[in-house]
Image: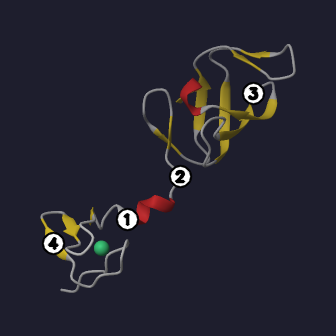
Amino acid sequence: MSLPPCPKCNSEYVYQDQSNLVCPECAFEWNPNEVNDDDVVKVKDANGALLADGDKVTVIKDLKIKGSSQVIKIGTKALVRRVLDKKDHELDCKVDGVGEMMVTAKFVKKA
Ligand SMILES: [Zn+2]
């Protein structure tokens, strides 16, 4: 069984410690099953459920639309077109009755 080199220092002397791999040279420890997940954007809704492109969500509080007097009412449904790697307004949504807009993930829940 060959282990992958250390992702931090490229050392080949990596050894396995239960489910983790450990690098003796830089002391980096990681789970090889999680490494590939780093590229995947992880955005969670109000309940902590992972959101993905194409998910249907419901708005859980009234949201003011920036630069407009319009409000997205609680209970409004939206379709997640794309999940983006951002701090807020991570969801590129098509909101019922409003249209396309960016919505913050913690203000919605999976429908
Ligand atoms: Zn290392």
Q: Splitting the image into 4 quarters, where does residue 11 fall?
A: bottom left
Q: Residue at x 75, y 27 (%)?
A: 96
Which secondary structure, mark 2? Answer: loop
Q: Upstream in the sequence, badge 1 or badge 4? A: 4
Q: What amino acid does circle 2 point to?
A: Val
Can you tell me whether the CB of the residue at mark 4 lies under 8 Å from the nearest atom of ligand 1? Answer: no
Q: Nearer the viewer, residue 94 or 64?
A: 64
- Residue wearing tag 4: 16
Q: CA distance from mark 3 to mark 1?
A: 37 Å
Nearer the viewer's eye, disc 3 or disc 2? Answer: 2
**Label ID, residue 35:** 1
Label 4 packing within 10 angstroms: few (<14), some (14-19), many (20+): some
Q: CA distance from mark 3 to mark 2?
A: 25 Å
Q: Are marks 3 and 2 in contact (CB under 8 Å)?
A: no
Which secondary structure, mark 4? Answer: strand
- Residue wearing tag 3: 96
> Which residue ends up furthest to the left in the rendered image?
18
